């Protein structure tokens, strides 16, 4: 392996910045030992400062902070921290496995640290009230009240003794195990995976008490693990019997009266393009040539709101779920199968009810006319992405003229979108080939091709145009209730972290004085395109972004560069799209008065369920990756360092994208320590460094299925 010594130098700080940093560090030193008087020499010793000029600066800062009442003088030249004011904050608690907590408060830039032992009986995700010092440089606090439990059901493996048991949580971020009395075992046996419900936790020095509510089965069984993942993230699997019964009672017949209300597209060329294993086809495209320089493109979306009526059990269940969940080997749908796979699915050669966005476009892909409303269609052909890609590449096949025209228009729209600040990450997707028992026998990555992007571009067009149209109609009606998909600007602190990170690869991220970072991010991604470090730079850039969410208040979509954006195109699998359909029809009909508060609550719930679904999907991928690598113990693979911590290195394998940890003890040839400033591990003798993006070779040391963790050892 080739590792350069001292390959990245810390960027020099300006004099003003250095003084500010020193002032913060000094105050932190006093806050760590608030009752101990210190003189300037002792402070310098604590900070490791030996330079005489720096010591003089420390002495001057101590006097200045005394004048500001941040320090108190106790005898000549000796200082202590001033008494710290106390305040409270309510937020979401995050707790690491070792018990350290962080309070995340909406609207607050920095989290409040909660030291181990001061989290009371709160659990990860709970809404809590914390007492802290608001003036501390790095505030720390303690939990004084649990406002609301995030959840009371947990998944884990039973460790059973003679008269009691403990449930060891599957979520490795949980910092406590659950005590299960003998009478609360519900027939569960040692080693089984179970769901437990929190009964009580009155004393933080004891374990929380729980009872077994469901026995899932033996760990390692594919169905058990997938159901466990859903339960772990609080996501429902089975539909209530009465909801399924209500779905079965819905008539499949489309009446003449209903057709009469709609624009008829049954005679216009229409097709779907979806993954090969898809069963719910919620979008279709129609193409009609108007003249030599004009074309009509229809984006037809399943009219779920026709079947899913307000104030019904079906509606309540759809809102509760808010999204379909896509695990490695199965889909947990938002709607019962009769709706998702049959009534609403735009299957070929079947008449289907749709809500459509129809665009008249010139051959430069500019929209000259748009129409929104309810339609009826009949799809002529179901394409898989692979089949459509074959048509694009060979320029031949079913509906070749239509697909090639749409592909050309999509590329023109995409180019225009990029010119106006849309950021294209085009990340790889991890996929598996499974055997009949669900065990992975191959892991591979899937890259978006032209056929995927064709669909994406027309869906983006429909989402953007619907949002723009409704925003202007609703404003005229003096009713602002609508569901937007918003994406805030990046946090400047995270952008600064990204700037420092990419420096080690020789890249510059220059943010102009006006603060508009988009051109700089696009330039960075373009510069890294095709380079060995491209994936890691994409990942770190994505981490610097805010999270997209649903909201009734529009702030635009930063990542796409759109002033107005919503989700209109996937109502079979996303509840917000159903809300958008209802509101769009309401405004098309000239109605107003939708309850914005009601929609705002539904937006927050949908964003939360989307986050949980994403975490469950990632957990299922991680489990299958670990399961796959468990058959490759002792084998060697090439990888890229994807994370650096004081405990060791995270390495992502090049071919399979499986990620594992190389502990410091498993890096031979030297004793390595963590350089926090430069985010590298450095050898004390050889000065060899390992940092993010470095290529390494590793050996698979272990695969822990319960924790979904891989252990690697470095190969030198």
Image (spheres, helix red, strand yellow):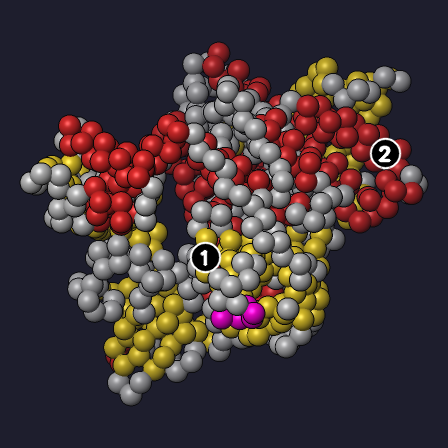
Q: Residue at x 29, y 88 (%)?
A: 162
User: CA–CA distance between discs 1 and 2?
Assistant: 53 Å
Q: Nearer the viewer, residue 555 or 518?
A: 518
Q: Which mark is residue 328?
A: none
Local packing at callout 1 (Cα closer than 10 Å; few below 14, some 14-19, many 20+) is some
Q: Nearer the viewer, residue 612 or 640?
A: 640
Whether 634 is among the magenta residues is no
Q: Which residue is mark 1?
A: 674
User: In terms of image quadrants, where is residue 202?
Assistant: bottom left
Q: Which residue is mark 2?
A: 404
In the rendered view, does 638 fall on the left or right side of 99? right
Q: Nearer the viewer, residue 266 or 487?
A: 487
In the rendered view, does 550 fall on the left or right side of 447? left
User: In terms of image quadrants, where is residue 565?
Assistant: top right
Give the secondary structure at mark 2: helix
Image quarter hosting the C terminus: bottom right
Q: Is residue 469 above or below residue 75?
A: above
In the rendered view, does 551 fall on the left or right side of 403? left
**Whole-percent x, y for residue 279 in the image:** 67, 52
In the image, farthest residue toward the front: 52
In the image, farthest residue toward the bottom: 162
Image quarter hosting the N terminus: bottom right
**Whole-percent x, y for residue 96 in the image:** 36, 58
Q: Which residues are magenta?
A: 663-669
In the image, farthest residue toward the left: 75
Give whichever of discs 1 and 2 has the lower sequence position: 2
Q: Nearer the viewer, residue 535 or 460?
A: 535
Give the secondary structure at mark 1: strand
Q: Residue at x 85, y 23 (%)?
A: 289
């Amino acid at each position: 392996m080739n590792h350069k010594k001292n390959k990245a130098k810390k960027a020099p700080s300006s004099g003003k910045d250095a003084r500010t940093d020193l002032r913060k560090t000094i105050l932190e030193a006093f806050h760590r030992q608030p009752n101990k008087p210190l003189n300037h020499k002792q402070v310098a010793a604590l900070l490791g400062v030996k330079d005489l000029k720096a010591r003089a600066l420390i002495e001057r800062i101590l006097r200045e902070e005394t004048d500001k009442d941040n320090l108190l003088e106790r005898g000549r030249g000796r200082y202590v921290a001033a008494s710290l004011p106390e305040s409270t904050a309510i937020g979401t608690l995050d707790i690491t496995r070792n018990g350290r907590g962080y309070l995340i408060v909406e609207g607050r830039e920095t989290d409040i640290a909660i030291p181990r032992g001061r989290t009371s009986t709160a659990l990860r995700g709970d809404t809590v009230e914390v007492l802290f010092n608001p003036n501390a440089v790095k505030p720390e606090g303690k939990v004084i009240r649990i406002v609301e439990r995030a959840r009371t059901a947990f998944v884990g493996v039973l460790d059973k003794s003679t008269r009691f048991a403990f449930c060891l949580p599957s979520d490795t971020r949980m910092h406590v195990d659950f005590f299960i009395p003998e009478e609360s075992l519900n027939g569960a046996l040692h080693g089984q995976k179970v769901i437990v419900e929190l009964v009580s936790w009155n004393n933080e020095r004891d374990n929380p008490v729980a009872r077994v509510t469901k026995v899932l089965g033996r760990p390692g069984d594919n169905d058990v693990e997938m159901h466990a993942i859903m339960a772990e993230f609080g996501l429902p699997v089975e539909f209530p019997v009465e909801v399924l019964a209500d779905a079965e009672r819905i008539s499949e017949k489309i009446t003449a009266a209903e057709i009469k209300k709609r624009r008829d597209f049954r005679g216009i060329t229409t097709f779907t393009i979806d993954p090969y294993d898809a069963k719910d086809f919620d979008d279709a495209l129609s193409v009609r040539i108007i003249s030599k320089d004009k074309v009509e493109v229809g984006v037809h979306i399943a009219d779920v709101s026709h079947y899913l009526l307000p104030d019904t059990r079906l509606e309540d269940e759809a809102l509760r779920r808010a999204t379909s969940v896509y695990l490695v080997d199965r889909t947990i749908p938002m709607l019962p199968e009769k709706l998702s796979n049959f009534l609403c699915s735009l299957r070929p050669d079947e008449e289907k009810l749709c809500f459509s966005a129809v665009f008249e476009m010139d051959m430069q892909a500019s929209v000259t006319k748009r129409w929104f409303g309810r339609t009826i269609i009949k799809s002529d052909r179901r394409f898989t992405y692979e089949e459509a890609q074959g048509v694009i590449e060979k320029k031949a096949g079913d509906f070749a003229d239509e697909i090639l025209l749409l592909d050309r228009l999509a590329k023109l729209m995409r180019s225009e979108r990029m010119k106006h600040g849309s950021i294209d990450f085009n990340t790889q997707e991890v996929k598996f080939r499974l055997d009949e028992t669900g065990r992975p026998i191959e892991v591979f990555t899937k890259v978006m091709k032209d056929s995927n992007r064709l669909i994406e571009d027309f869906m983006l067009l429909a989402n953007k145009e619907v949002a723009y149209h409704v925003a202007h109609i609703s404003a005229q009606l003096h009713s602002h209730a609508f569901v937007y998909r918003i994406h805030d600007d990046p946090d400047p602190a995270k952008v600064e972290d990204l700037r420092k990170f990419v420096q080690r690869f020789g890249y510059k991220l220059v943010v102009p004085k006006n603060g508009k970072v988009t051109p700089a991010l696009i330039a960075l991604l373009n510069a890294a395109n095709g380079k060995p470090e491209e994936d890691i730079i994409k990942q770190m850039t994505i981490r610097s972004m805010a999270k997209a969410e649903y909201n009734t208040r529009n702030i635009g979509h930063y990542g796409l560069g759109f002033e107005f954006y919503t989700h209109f195109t996937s109502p079979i699998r996303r509840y917000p799209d159903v809300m958008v359909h209802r509101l769009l029809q309401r405004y098309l009909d000239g109605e107003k008065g939708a309850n914005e508060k009601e929609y705002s609550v539904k937006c927050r719930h949908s964003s939360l369920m989307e986050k949980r679904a994403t975490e469950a999907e990632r957990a299922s991928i991680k489990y299958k990756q670990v399961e796959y690598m468990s058959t490759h113990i002792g084998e060697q693979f090439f990888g890229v360092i994807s994370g650096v911590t004081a405990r060791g290195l995270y390495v992502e394998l090049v071919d399979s994208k499986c990620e594992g940890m190389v502990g410091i003890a498993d890096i031979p040839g030297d004793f390595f320590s963590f350089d926090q400033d430069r985010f590298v591990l450095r050898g004390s003798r050889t000065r060899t460094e390992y940092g993010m993006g470095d290529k390494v070779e590793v050996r698979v040391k272990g695969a822990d299925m319960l924790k979904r963790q891989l252990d690697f050892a470095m190969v030198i």
